[in-house]
Image (cartoon, rainbow, N blue to C red):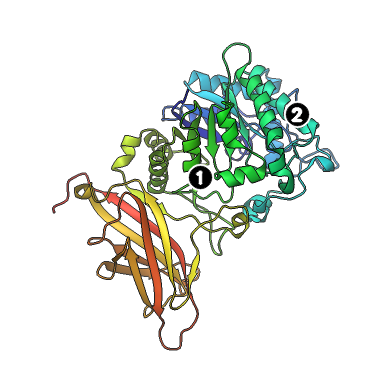
């Protein structure tokens, strides 16, 4: 049966075990739960490992130890804190995982343990998928030193390990269920073999489903993080549509880790359609960032604003998702973050709230596996490019509640006297008011923002098309311009506007 959920994911590390000085107090141990309690979040998802050990005293696997120096000590404070914080709880007779499970239940939340399916400490070289994932080139991930070729599920030892850990989490702990994370180092087999081994992974998912959902007492929930397009899933060795047809999962969560940038228009319609006549829920994933490090020059991490998150959340609901999952919000979570987690739980609250839509960035590495964006897009003289975007708002039908519609376009290598034609859904924007500003602080000469205050041309609910053509350049200026970003801001007023 489909269930409406708002999930919040904590990876156990960045905003928990890494940061608290040992010995961690019980109040600090409860913090991941307490900081989201009282919001719309009804399901807490906890990442139980990062590839080099589990964050609880496992009997099916090995507890996290971190990298050790020859002296037997830790080189890095965050690893030392993690080990000492867990051991401090254990020395007091407390299981680090049980502490969180009990707290989540006390606060009225489900607890789901999220397990990465491609990390296994017992791996030998022959057990690894030989080709590194494309996001290995992303400095924000590659710099962690954790990227390694994932586990090759062709090997029985790998499958047995994942089955054992999932069974332990479902049966030996009072979790409400287990989530299988197929995303980090996402390919389960060598790429050239993946489509020939779809049944191998399907059989494993079926075994885990029987173990988790068939545990003694109440059935456990089984969810899965999957790649956002069907082609990407199949190329990774995951026949997700078959999993849905066989009823193996309670929910699916389509996403990628490259980059951690919020996606206002994820291509998940195929998954919603595939799950439509099943009992499997589909949840939209809300990444935390607007600007993501390592993707563009001079870019530092910026968290998405509430208006951006609302835009992505509203679009996901319009696509038919049964709930949303958020993570990595600006920490420590404050009133703004808690308010946002409350608001995204109710689609009605999003309808007349300010929103900020923007296009997905292109990643050269991810484009090779079928995950592409629309910007940046170069345009030569005499050429025209089109950009499409979905919006959940209805600016035409709800015109009296709209305070402002602001279309923002960032152009690189553009001069004031460039001859450029802009149209929105076929209507010229030449008569709209335009305000120009510098495109950045470090290199203000490099790009400029154009802000069109839309009054005569109105975007429509659903799909919109923006076209930009470069008709000519000033004398002596050659080369192309590049459309770096396209954004739409929708601002509401509490009072009907005068029309």
Residue 203, numbered label: none
Q: Is residue 367 above or below residue 233?
A: below
Q: Position of residue 320 (x, y in %)?
A: 41, 37
Tell me which corner region of the image, top left, top right, bottom left or bottom right, holds residue 114: top right
Q: Are marks 2 and 1 in contact (CB under 8 Å)?
A: no
**In the image, what residue occupies the spot 50% across and 64% down?**
376
Q: Is residue 345 above or below residue 218?
A: below
Q: Answer with mark 2 or mark 1, whichever residue precedes in sequence.
A: 2
Q: Is residue 397 above or below residue 483?
A: above
**In the image, what residue occupies the spot 59% across and 56% down?**
367
Task: Estimate the spatial distance between the alpha carbons at disc 2 and disc 1, rounded to whole Å.
Answer: 30 Å
Residue 287, numbered label: 1
Tell me which corner region of the image, top left, top right, bottom left or bottom right, holds residue 349: top left
Side of 322 relative to 395 (left or right)? right
**In the image, what residue occupies the spot 60% across and 60% down?**
364
Please name the residue that numbered disc 2 is placed on. 161
Closer mark to the observer between disc 2 and disc 1: 2
**In the image, what residue occupies the spot 54% across and 34% down?**
252
Tell me which corner region of the image, top left, top right, bottom left or bottom right, holds residue 85: top right
Q: Position of residue 149 (x, y in %)?
A: 74, 46
Q: Position of residue 257 (x, y in %)?
A: 59, 46
Of 213 and 382, which appears nearest the observer? 382
Q: Number of callouts in the render?
A: 2
Q: Which type of secondary structure does the marked residue at label 2 adopt?
A: helix
Residue at the outermost right position:
70
Q: Position of residue 92 (x, y in %)?
A: 68, 19
Q: Which type of secondary structure does the marked residue at label 1 adopt?
A: loop
- Disc 2 residue crowd, few under 14, some 14–19, many 20+, Cα 10 Å: some
Residue at the outermost left position:
499
- Does residue 325 appear anywhere in the picture? no
- Does residue 155 appear anywhere in the picture? yes
């Amino acid at each position: 049966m489909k269930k409406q959920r708002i999930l919040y994911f904590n990876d156990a590390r960045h905003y928990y075990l890494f940061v608290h000085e040992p010995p961690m107090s019980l109040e600090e141990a409860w913090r991941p739960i307490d900081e989201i309690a009282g919001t719309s979040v009804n399901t807490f998802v906890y990442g139980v490992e990062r590839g080099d050990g589990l964050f609880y005293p496992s009997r099916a696997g090995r507890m996290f130890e971190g990298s050790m120096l020859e002296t037997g000590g830790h080189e890095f404070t965050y690893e030392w804190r993690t080990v000492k914080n867990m051991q401090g709880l254990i020395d007091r007779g407390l299981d680090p995982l049980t502490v969180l499970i009990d707290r989540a239940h006390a606060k009225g939340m489900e607890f789901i343990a999220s397990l990465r399916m491609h990390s296994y400490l017992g791996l030998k070289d022959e057990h690894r998928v030989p080709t590194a994932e494309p996001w290995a080139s992303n400095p924000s991930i590659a710099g962690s030193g954790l990227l390694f070729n994932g586990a090759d599920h062709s090997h029985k030892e790998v499958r047995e390990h994942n089955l054992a850990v999932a069974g332990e989490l479902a049966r030996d702990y009072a979790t409400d269920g287990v989530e299988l994370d197929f995303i980090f180092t996402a390919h389960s087999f060598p790429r050239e073999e993946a489509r020939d081994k779809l049944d191998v992974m399907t059989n494993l998912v079926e075994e885990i489903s029987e173990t988790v959902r068939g545990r003694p007492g109440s059935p456990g929930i089984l969810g899965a993080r999957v790649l956002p397009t069907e082609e990407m899933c199949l190329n990774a060795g995951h026949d997700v549509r078959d999993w849905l047809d066989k009823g193996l999962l309670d929910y699916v969560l389509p996403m990628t880790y490259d980059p951690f940038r919020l996606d206002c228009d994820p291509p998940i319609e195929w998954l919603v359609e595939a799950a439509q006549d099943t009992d499997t829920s589909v949840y939209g994933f809300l990444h935390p960032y607007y600007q993501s490090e390592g993707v563009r020059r001079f870019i530092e991490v910026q968290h998405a604003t509430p208006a951006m998150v609302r835009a992505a959340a509203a679009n996901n609901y319009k696509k038919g998702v049964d709930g949303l999952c958020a993570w990595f919000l600006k920490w420590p979570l404050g009133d703004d973050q808690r308010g946002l987690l409350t608001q995204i739980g109710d689609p009605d609250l999003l309808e007349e709230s300010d929103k900020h839509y923007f296009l997905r960035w292109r990643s050269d590495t991810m484009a090779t596996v079928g995950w592409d964006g629309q910007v940046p897009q170069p345009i030569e003289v005499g050429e025209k490019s089109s950009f499409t975007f979905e919006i959940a708002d209805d600016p035409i039908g709800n015109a009296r509640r709209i305070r402002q519609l602001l279309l923002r376009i960032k152009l690189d290598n553009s001069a004031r006297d460039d001859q450029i034609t802009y149209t929105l859904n076929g209507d010229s924007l030449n008569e709209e008011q335009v305000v120009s500003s510098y495109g950045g602080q470090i290199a203000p000469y490099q790009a400029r923002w154009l802000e069109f205050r839309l009054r005569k041309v109105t975007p429509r609910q659903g799909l919109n098309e923006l076209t930009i053509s470069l008709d000519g350049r000033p004398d002596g200026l050659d080369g192309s311009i590049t459309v770096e970003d396209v954004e739409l801001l929708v601002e509401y007023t509490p009072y009907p506007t005068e029309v």
